[in-house]
Amino acid sequence: MSGALHYREPNRLAAGMLAMAVHGGFLLLLMFGVHWQNRAPDSFSVELWQSLPLDEAVSMNEPAPVAVPKQEEVATPKQEEVPASPPPPTPQAEIELRDRKVVKKTPPQPSARELHRRREAEAQRRLEEQAEQRRKAEQARVRDEVRAATAAEVGRYQDMIRGKIRHNIVMPPDVSPNAEVVFKVTLLPGGSVLDAVLLKSSGNPAYDEATERAIYKAQPLPLPTDPLLKKEFRELRLTIRPEEK
């Protein structure tokens, strides 16, 4: 028992000394830290220079070194992604697409009511066209009748004028029955002769002069009472023959 206790005593002495050393070091550390915090800051002085030293001026004039980017910092251009082409359509898809296009292009069929309305409108349009054609034909027929009636009335009054002039001719001797003379006669509204101009001689001066005298002697010449027909008698081209043919 005493031998065991005698063996443990050296270890206890070492441990005690180690503990005292650690506490002593810790105490010194505390004292040094407090002394360092209470220490006044070091003073410093500033010198003013009128010009930089030669070495520093040369170093400032030298161009600044160009920073070379690191290998990993250089951006590599991205390659554009090429869109993948769609797969070719299958025959069934082409048929469906074509059928859809045909359906879109085909206009909607009108209803039976719409078809009936269109047929009635077309029939009405044809009736109106036929009525317009008949109206124009009737107008043309009336114009032709009026023109023919006017020409007939004008011819009738011209025959009356020629007969009255012929009745007043003092026929010279040796006048051929086929002789004819043409005068342009200008009339006043009352039938008086304003002027008579010889347009074509009969070849017999005596017959020409006798006809001219008869024109003035026969006035007033007969004129129609219709104002529209009177316009046709302002100037007359009269052919006078010895005998009426």
Image (tube, rainbow, N blue to C red):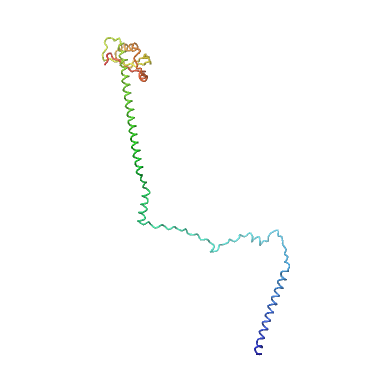
Q: Is residue 117 above or below residue 226?
A: below
Residue 219 coordinates in the image, percent (x, y): 35, 12
On screen, residue 53 versus residue 235, left or right, reads right
Image quadrant assignment for residue 227: top left
**Total marks placed:** 0
Q: Position of residue 141 (x, y in %)?
A: 32, 27
Instruction: Residue 18 in the image: state x and y as whole percent.
Output: 67, 80
Given residues 39 and 136, the one toward you in this image is 136
Residue 139 coordinates in the image, percent (x, y): 34, 27
Q: Quadrant of the C terminus?
A: top left
Instruction: Please state, as top left, top right, bottom left or bottom right, where the N terminus lies in the image.
Output: bottom right
Closer to the camera in the image, 83 or 51: 83
Q: Quadrant of residue 151?
A: top left
Which residue occupies the foreground of this view, 107 or 158? 107
Horizontal placement of 169 versus 30: left or right? left
In the image shown, does 175 or 244 lie closer to the viewer?
Answer: 244
| Residue occupying the far bottom of the picture | 2
